[in-house]
Image (cartoon, rainbow, N blue to C red):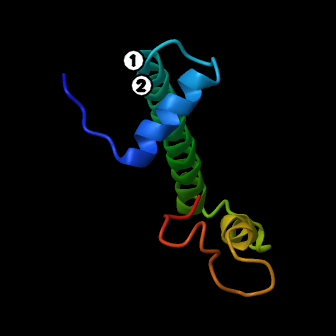
Amino acid sequence: MNINLTPELERLIQDKISAGLYRSQSEVVREALRLLVEQDRLRHARIARIRAAHTEHLAHADRKDVPDNGTAARAAARPLRKRRAPGSGKPSPKTAGRPPA
């Protein structure tokens, strides 16, 4: 397999090897791919938890078993508040464009 990398990524790999953290370019790439797989696994697990909570909430709503005290609205808004740039009321540049957590 032949992979083309940007000069920045090539420098990053060389820096990791020079620092003694890895012995070869292949080791760096394998570790990066292992981390990508783990990140994907965590993301899928999080999505599954969110879907399960949503399904449970809908089941309660169907039974009209949802308290009307604003708890659900506050819980839904909580991730949005965390993602806003402090004091600006606008999404932070770091999180702009990403779907809500």
Q: Is residue 84 left or right of residue 98?
A: right
Identified by mark 2, the residue type is: Val
* Residue occupying the point 69% across, 75% down: 84
* Residue occupying the point 71% across, 87% down: 89
Residue at numbered disc 1: 26
Q: Nearer the viewer, residue 39 or 59?
A: 39
Q: Is residue 55 left or right of residue 91?
A: left
Image x and y of residue 44, in percent? 47, 38
Q: CA distance from mark 2 to mark 1?
A: 5 Å
Q: Is residue 78 left or right of residue 13?
A: right
Image x and y of residue 21, in percent? 62, 19
Q: Could you say whether the residue bearing mark 2 is in a helix, strand or loop?
A: helix
* Residue occupying the point 47% across, 28% down: 32
Q: What is the number of the mark on residue 29?
A: 2
- Eyeballing the image, is 3 above or below 63? above
Image x and y of residue 58, in percent? 53, 57
Q: Could you say whether the residue bearing mark 1 is in a helix, strand or loop?
A: helix
Q: Nearer the viewer, residue 48 or 42?
A: 42
